[in-house]
Image (tube, helix red, strand yellow):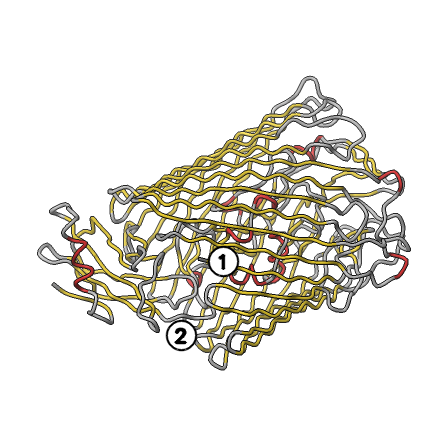
Amino acid sequence: MRIWGTNVGCVFILAAILFSTSFASDKGLIVGRVMDKKTGEGLPGVNVQIENTVLGASTNLHGAFMIRRVPYGVYTVKISMIGYQKRRVNNVNVSRDDTAFVIVRLEETPIEIDPVVVTASKWQEEAANTPATVEVMTSKEILQRNPVKIEDALETAAGVQIIQESVNIRGSDGYTRGIGSRVLVMLDDVPVMNSDFGAVNWFMISPADVARAEVVRGAGSALHGSSAMGGVVNFITRDPQPDSRTYVRALLGVYDKPYEDEWDLNKFQNFHRQDFTHSRKIGNLGMRISGGRSQSTGFTEQGEFERYNLSGKFIYRFPNASKLTLFGNYMHDDSDVFIRWKNQKEATKVPPAELDKHQTQTGLTLFTKYSLPISSKAAIEARAYFNRFLLGTQVTSAGTFAPALGLGGSIQGNLIPFPSVSIVYGSDFKFDKVESDTSLYGNRDAILAAPYFQLDWQTLRNLNLTFGGRYDRYEIYSDPQARFKEGRVYDHFSPKFGINYKPFEGSTFRASVSNGFKFPVVAQLFLEFDAAGFTFRASPDLRSEESWTYEFGWRQTITPTWFFEINGFYTEVDDLIEVLIFPNLEAQFANIEQTQLPGIEFVTNGRWWDNRLGLKANFLYMDPRDEVQDQLLPYRQKFIAFVAPSLRLGSLEFQLDFKYASAQEVYLLSSFPQLVPQKVLDGRIFYYFGNHSFFVGVNNIGNYSYTLRDESLEEIRNFVAGFTMEF
């Protein structure tokens, strides 16, 4: 018997597992335990992976793990967990007459220097090995921003700007008015975009249920398809824990009076949110149940909403190391509609005709995934999902919508034919069914088929090459009863090429060339309606958007808890789809023939002074330009900065966030002088005791007034307090 690792005190605990397990005669076992270096306690939920294979496991309640059916040989075992430094254990020998034991103590770390990600390559890979620019936001980072809406937490990520519910990555989207997002948002690798509007269903994602968010900046179409032209945000939900755990979070906030006295509505304005999750494991079945509810009076007229969601995640692990995951989520949103202010002197009020505008949204998402390792070098995963989204009372003058249905799935294979080569291949499928009154867009069915592949080749010890591509064919069927009867067919092949080079320890250079694309969605092509004085016209002749992005990046680790990153990028887009608003307030989607988005960004994150002092900062400068009109693209800023210092003294932690965005130079409605920069300072104080915390905070401390879209005031100063408990 041989033992690898840093401690041999747990051999008897691990050996007890062997007596209850049978295994094949031609395969061996790797058994081990992972502990906290400081406390010596076992760590549950640690990811254990055998390098250059698809074999792995997770630790149980006591930190123990077992990897079955390991072919005889010598391996390197990678051990990782969010919040702890990764470890590699070399020369783990699995032989016919012996069992390999691995015992490791992990050291806690406040900074994720090189996290394991799945979004950039569609399988687990260290972020430092990919040619893509990836940022990982942990659950702690997300919850410390006290978000009532999950998208609010994303604004701390580099190059990200949220305009209403439109998520911009490096200026990709501007303000889409909830139609046709160029950033793909996923929940556990499953898209949460509705089928008719192509918008993100943010309300179904509960902040307390997220283990981490992976933000991929730049075109992701070569693996993820049409909606990923500007980037990808993948929320990874928490897996069920080995022991019974319950988490509760609650916050309450109140709005201050606006900066301008004439904006005061003379009423008590507040918001609150509550979340809970419960996790347990029974035998091979892990279960996690979650729920959340949020409510607000808003700080303007027509600003009220009430939202709630319920979700469940179930994971069953079979003896053959395969895994079945089932997930379900239901959300409900009941909210007023604020489209534009009454006038600039009455910025918190709406025109009389817009009072009592109301909408109800309901959504149901179900998905299942089955993962099966065929051998130590190959695995397959099958996914299937169902989305049902209904936008109830519309802000349109007439017409109704039926629920938008999306039924999709994928089959993916992972293959490691040689230690230096890994291949991801598969195909996505989707069927959309959307129905509305014939005066809107009619009844439209659509089907998508999209095979893809990616090859990663480690040509030298410190040089990785990536090749990949995806072919998408998307067909929208005709409706003989609709005003625009014809259907549409779009297809596109999007290749990518990337290099990752590590000349020195802690230094990584990345370069990539990637093609992106975006098909028009049903609402952009055929929807016509009137709202708030605007008349939206259909655009049945829209062409697909296509982009090429060239990127170079350098990432440098200075200490184990401090790194910086510099990235330069240049994106050319042909036929960018943007909204045009004419003087008579008619609006229509149209193609802009040539646009470019060059830019440079700087990112740093560090902790010092024995984890007492921290700083997260990122800066982005870009020049998103319409080459035809020779002007900036609307709703994009040239300069965006985020700076967040923090100080922890014992059980107290003090945090500040400052978000700056330069003034927009182009609005579609230019009749009002709204062009001011965003300058928002937030502050929070946390008190920690055990697994619990209390917090108080002030958002928009200076009560600064600004707009990010036409005739719509952003949030005024508000005060928030709350607590989290885990038991």
Disc 2 on helix, strand or loop?
A: loop
Amino acid of disc 1: Ala
Counting from the top left corner in percent of width and height, residue 111 is at 47, 69
Front residue of this view, candidates 37 and 486: 37
Amino acid of disc 2: Phe
Tell which circle, 1 or 2, labels the residue nearer the N-terminal end: 1
| Up-down relation of residue 577 to residue 435 (above or below) | below
Counting from the top left corner in percent of width and height, residue 487 is at 64, 25
Front residue of this view, candidates 407 and 578: 407
Left or right: 42, with 542 as reference point: left
Left or right: 174, with 670 as reference point: left
Q: Quadrant of residue 622?
A: bottom right
> Which residue is disc 1 drawn over?
132
Residue 349 at least partly seen: yes
| Up-down relation of residue 160 to residue 589 (above or below) | below
Residue drawn at x 79%, y 27% as measured from the top left: 398
Neighbor class of circle 2 (other Cα within 10 Å; few <14, some 14-19, many 20+) is few
**Image quadrant containing the N terminus:** bottom left
> Which residue is disc 2 drawn over?
504
Counting from the top left corner in percent of width and height, residue 394 is at 74, 33
